[in-house]
């Protein structure tokens, strides 16, 4: 009972911090302190608990070197004009009669390139909402399509025949690859079957919704403002193309990002005429426009510093997971999982646990780490590979976390888009991916 009380109180702390806007690492540290105090009362030595926390955190070390690079890529791509060009040409090609469909498609493509759902929503997503703001259409279907598309870059999708899934720059993809000790590109290669059909079904549903609810586009100044601030020569797309080509050549992801950053810096200097000091500042602190710029709220973000908070969350999350695993504090979960017979039921159990950890942890990162810790022994005992565990995590906890109203995976994008949890019923791709994955495993049972 004492442990359940500690977990329940920690859950309330996390919920409170999310709705009050506090940095989630603070209540996480408090939750870890409460957990340590309860376990010490149960007879565990403080030194042992600290060692368990350190052991758990070691799983985060490899991904910590990637996360700052993701922030740097985002900032440099904006400074180089890559992101503005994607927003500009993407919106210009949209047919208003199929606006919701194109909102899903464009955000999906941008999320594949940026590898960050928040970055996707903050750029192409908010631009699409601004374009559609003059319409009398309920904003929730549009927001649902945008947020669903933003998580295509985090989901188990591989729709290009020559072979890679969602974004190789996705922080969740890299985190899962590291904690499951699997190869990122191998994971990507294994995800074709589960991702392609849900993408097609979702696209058709959004197409039907577009036909039922066409958007009357009245916003015309956004594209003009972008073209005035940035040189939109097609060469600005080179940083993104560099990432694409290097990914196809299976170049190590950190090397690919460093090369793309270098290319983007050159373009930002010679084509966008930013100074070297400005470019370096953006790379570290994040891109921003002047206070009087009308695009200040859209073309902003990235930077290595911006990823430090996520790094802190990853470290604390893995430390808590290490303590829970080392003390076998949640052995009741194993008792439940031991009763499972079929792989499809294990997938369903992973789904339930992923929803629970996503609700408890309030972040996608915590949900990924805790779910992996809770189910990994069952996968090992049943002879399932780490790659299968990685795929199942991608198809469950990663895409279901945004559907929990208080989880920041969905709360932050909704806030950016100036909407609320009403988007959840329309984020169809996230539901369909999990359901389709379960059906595929059920057929094999």
Image (tube, rainbow, N blue to C red):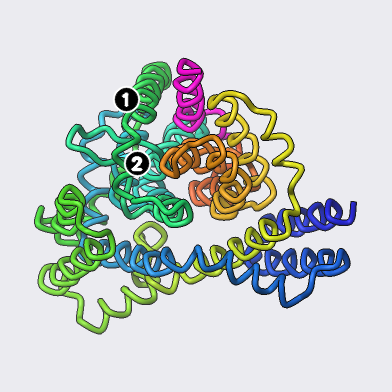
**Nearer mark to the viewer, of 1 and 2:** 2
Q: Where is residue 70? Give x, y as percent.
A: 35, 63
- Number of numbered discs on residues: 2
Q: What residue sits 25% from the left and 84% below the top? A: 277
Residue 260 lies left or right of residue 119; in this view the side is left
Q: Secondary structure at mark 2?
A: helix
Q: Residues within 10 Å of mark 2 (few under 14, many from 20)?
A: many
Say if the magenta span includes residue 221: no
Q: Secondary structure at mark 1?
A: helix
Residue 67 lies left or right of residue 332; in this view the side is left
Q: What residue sits 40% from the left and 50% below the top? A: 173
Type of secondary structure dominating the magenta stretch: helix
Which residue was labeled with disc 1?
A: 98
Kindly tell me whether residue 133 is visible in this rendering.
no
Say if the magenta span includes residue 424: yes
Q: Where is residue 398? Give x, y as percent.
A: 50, 43
Which residue was labeled with disc 2?
A: 107
Residue 366 numbered mark, or none: none
Most extreme residue toward the bottom, as rendered? 277
Residues at marks 1 and 2, CA–CA distance in whole angstroms: 14 Å
Q: Where is residue 121? Give x, y as percent.
A: 42, 48
User: Of residues 383 and 302, which is closer to you in this image?
Assistant: 383
Q: Where is residue 21? Give x, y as percent.
A: 64, 61
Task: Reply above or below: 127 against 426.
Answer: below
Kindly tell me whether residue 100 is visible in this rendering.
yes
Q: Residues within 10 Å of mark 1 (few under 14, many from 20)?
A: some
Residue 311 lies left or right of residue 168; in this view the side is right
Report the span colored magenta. 422-445
Q: What residue sits 64% from the left and 68% below the top? A: 53
């Amino acid at each position: 009972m004492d442990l359940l009380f500690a977990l329940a109180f920690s859950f309330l702390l996390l919920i409170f911090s999310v709705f009050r806007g506090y940095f989630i690492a603070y209540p996480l540290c408090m939750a870890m302190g409460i957990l340590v105090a309860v376990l010490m009362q149960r007879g565990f030595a403080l030194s042992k608990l600290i060692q368990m926390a350190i052991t758990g955190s070691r799983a985060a070390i490899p991904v910590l070197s990637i996360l700052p690079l993701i922030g740097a890529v985002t900032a440099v791509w904006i400074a180089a004009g890559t992101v503005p060009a994607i927003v500009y040409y993407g919106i210009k090609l949209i047919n208003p009669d199929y606006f919701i469909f194109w909102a899903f498609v464009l955000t999906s493509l941008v999320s594949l390139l940026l590898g960050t759902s928040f970055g996707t929503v903050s750029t192409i997503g908010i631009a699409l909402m601004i374009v559609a703001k003059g319409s009398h259409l309920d904003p929730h279907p549009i927001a649902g399509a945008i947020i669903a598309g933003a998580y295509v870059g985090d989901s188990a999708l591989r729709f290009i025949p020559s072979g890679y899934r969602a974004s190789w720059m996705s922080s969740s993809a890299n985190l899962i690859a590291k904690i499951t000790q699997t190869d990122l590109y191998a994971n990507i290669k294994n995800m074709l079957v589960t991702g392609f059909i849900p993408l097609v079904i979702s696209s058709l549903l959004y197409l039907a919704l577009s036909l039922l609810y066409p958007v009357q586009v009245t916003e015309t100044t956004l594209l003009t403002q972008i073209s005035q601030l940035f040189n939109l020569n097609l060469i600005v797309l080179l940083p993104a193309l560099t990432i694409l080509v290097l990914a196809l050549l299976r170049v190590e992801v950190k090397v690919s990002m460093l090369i793309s950053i270098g290319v983007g810096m050159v373009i930002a200097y010679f084509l966008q005429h930013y100074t070297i000091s400005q470019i370096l500042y953006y790379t570290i602190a994040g891109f921003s426009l002047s206070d009087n710029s009308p695009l200040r709220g859209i073309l902003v973000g990235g930077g290595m510093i911006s990823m430090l908070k996520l790094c802190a969350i990853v470290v604390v999350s893995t430390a808590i997971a290490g303590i829970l695993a080392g003390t076998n504090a949640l052995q009741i979960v194993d008792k439940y999982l031991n009763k499972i017979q079929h792989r499809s039921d294990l997938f369903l159990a992973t789904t339930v646990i992923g929803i629970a950890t996503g609700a408890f942890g309030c972040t996608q990162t915590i949900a990924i780490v805790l779910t992996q810790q809770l189910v990994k022994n069952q996968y090992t005992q049943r002879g399932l590979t780490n790659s299968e565990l990685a795929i199942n995590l991608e198809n469950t906890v990663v895409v279901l976390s945004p559907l929990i109203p208080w989880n920041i995976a969905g709360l932050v994008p909704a806030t950016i888009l100036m909407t609320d949890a009403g988007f959840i019923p329309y984020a169809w791709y996230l539901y369909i991916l999990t359901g389709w994955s379960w059906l595929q495993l059920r057929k094999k049972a």
